[in-house]
């Protein structure tokens, strides 16, 4: 089983997910968008699988700092450009288990995924 966790290391939700995985001794690779960068092809694949509306974190400070015009003009193309330029706007964590993607941390979901 290949497990990758994408996000930003100082994010509280990332910290919860990493702690949950560590407590259960589940091996995973952590990829920090700020340190490791973000591959445009990978971002396109995420948006295709999950939809840009789900991937875009509208609760974060980076999103709230956008102008009203930027928020109004959001669509799949503008969201892609914004997320590529400012990966802090990607909802966190993004968990990849084999080829499946899961957004956000949820104890119940993680328990179901890793009990198999």
Image (cartoon, rainbow, N blue to C red):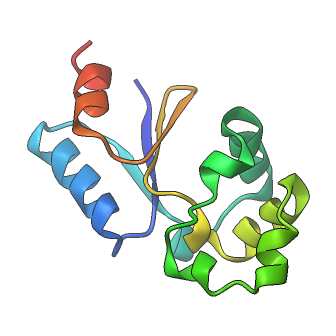
Residue at the location (70% across, 33% down)?
49
Residue at the location (77% across, 37% down)?
48
Residue 97 in percent (x, y) is at 45, 30
Number of marks: 0
Taking the image as shown, residue 106 lies to the left or right of residue 74, namely: left
Q: Is residue 68 above or below residue 48?
A: below
Depth check: 95 or 73 in front?
73
Residue 10 in percent (x, y) is at 33, 75
- Most distant residue in the top direction: 116
Taking the image as shown, residue 68 lies to the left or right of residue 21, namely: right
- Most distant residue in the left direction: 23
Residue 11 in percent (x, y) is at 35, 70
Residue at the location (68% across, 43% down)?
46
Taking the image as shown, residue 113 lies to the left or right of residue 89, namely: left
Asked where in the image residue 110 lies, by quadrant, the reply is: top left
Asked where in the image residue 66 lies, by quadrant, the reply is: bottom right
Q: Is residue 7 above or below residue 98?
A: below
Q: Is residue 57 above or below residue 108?
A: below
Residue 52 in percent (x, y) is at 72, 49
- The quadrant of the rendering that contains the C terminus is top left
Residue at the location (55% across, 67% down)?
33
Taking the image as shown, residue 80 lies to the left or right of residue 39, namely: right
- The quadrant of the rendering that contains the N terminus is top left
């Amino acid at each position: 089983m290949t497990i990758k966790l994408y996000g930003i290391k100082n994010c509280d939700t990332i910290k919860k997910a990493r702690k949950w995985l560590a407590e259960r001794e589940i091996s995973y690779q952590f990829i920090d968008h700020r340190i490791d960068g973000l591959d445009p092809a990978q971002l396109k694949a995420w948006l295709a699988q999950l939809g840009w509306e789900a991937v875009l974190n509208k609760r974060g400070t980076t999103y709230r700092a956008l102008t009203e015009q930027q928020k109004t003009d959001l669509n799949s193309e503008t969201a892609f450009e914004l997320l590529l330029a400012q990966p802090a706007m990607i909802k966190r964590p993004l968990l990849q288990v084999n080829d499946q993607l899961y957004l956000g941390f949820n104890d119940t979901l993680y328990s179901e995924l890793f009990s198999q």
